Image (cartoon, rainbow, N blue to C red):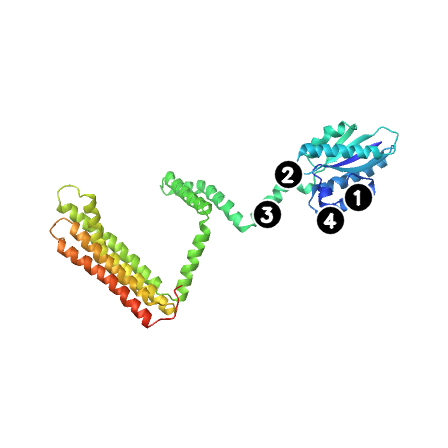
Amino acid sequence: MLLVLCVDLDDDLGRKTGVETPVVGRDAVRDAAVDLATTDPEDSDVNVMFQGLHVLDDLRREESEEVEVAAVTGVQGSEVRATRAVGEEVDRVLAGLSTGESVRAVVITDGAQDESVLPVIRSRVPIDSVRRVVVRQAQNLESMYYTMKQVLADPETRGTLLVPLGILLLIYPFVTIATFFDVPGAAVLGLISALLGLYTLFRGLGLESTVDEVADRVRNVLYAGRVTIITYVVAAALLVVGGAEGVSTLRTVETGIAGPPSAMTVLAALVNGAIQWFAAAGITSSLGQVTDEYLADRFKWRYLNAPFYVAAIAVVLYAVSGFLLPPIEGMTTLTLTDLAIALVVGTLLGVLSTLTFAVAESRYPTGADPA
């Protein structure tokens, strides 16, 4: 007698359908396979049982001896427990077969993991054949083809994979073209390598979302007619001018003293030359922000403190840096008295502005909460 054994080592049949195992007989195995296919069409054990039915029908046509089919299962988790459970179910199947003939088995599995139970089955019944079920669509070449097709259909994945590959493929033609214009190939390679490196960092750090957000904000600012877009540009220009003035002041100090300047002198020269322009940039940007808040009905009197605070800080830093500068022709240095006066003026400017706008806010409330 031939026994077609369909092996489900991790008991997908029992867990997903509730069918009691072992399942013996063509009709019972067919019903169990249909139940499992209905519950989980992607489970490979469905194909194992249908393959078992197919083998059963073929053997019944080709062989003169009696042929029966059965589905046996293990348990999920431990492989040792699973193989023992399969062995116990094979014993039950063999005990239930009413035949006086010797029984041989044809084992149907869906992979190497289920085939680990073969020694247990062989210890109970001779095995004539082992057949592994492989679904055509899951074979390596076709599976790879459809996987690549799906990956390339995704715009995000396509950009991540194909853009670096395209840059690499353009290296040789770019170098070839560069030679016609007497451009060193190393320069072209360096440029392409830099582009590829920047792109890789851009994608690896996930900066595309940040860039998109910045672009959206800039677009919204332009379309909304906000004043800050103008004041920020003016402030940036003032910062550049201030940096240049700071460097110019430092060079004047270096030419007017003997030997290299100290770190304190370098810092004082840079601050003294740049602070006026930096203060103008801060006041400009803060006034633009205050204007936008007023236009959006979110104005608060306390917002007007910002330009006064900037001016107060600028007065203090200018006085301190001027006091620390060495006496040089063409440079304005401040005395200790000048420094004291500047500190008092800066303090009073900050305190008085705070008190003034606090009083204004209490007596003339705007009714708007800060965003």
- The image shows residue 122, relative to residue 344, as above or below, that is above
Q: Residue at x 75, y 47 (%)?
A: 35
Question: Can you give x and y, in whole percent of width and height, for residue 36 in the image?
Answer: 73, 45
Name which residue type carries label 1: Arg
If the image is split into quadrants, where does the C terminus sit? bottom left
Residue under label 1: 30
In space, the residues marked 3 and 4 are separated at their CA atoms by 26 Å
- The image shows residue 123, relative to residue 266, as above or below, that is above
Q: Which of pointers 3 and 1 lies earlier in the amino acid sequence? A: 1
SS at mark 4? helix
Residue 109 occupies quadrant? top right
Residue under label 4: 38
In space, the residues marked 3 and 2 are separated at their CA atoms by 15 Å
Assess disc 1: are there few (<14), some (14-19) or many (≥20) residues with their C-alpha within 10 Å of its C-alpha.
some
Q: Which of pointers 3 and 2 lies earlier in the amino acid sequence? A: 2
Residue 150 badge: 3
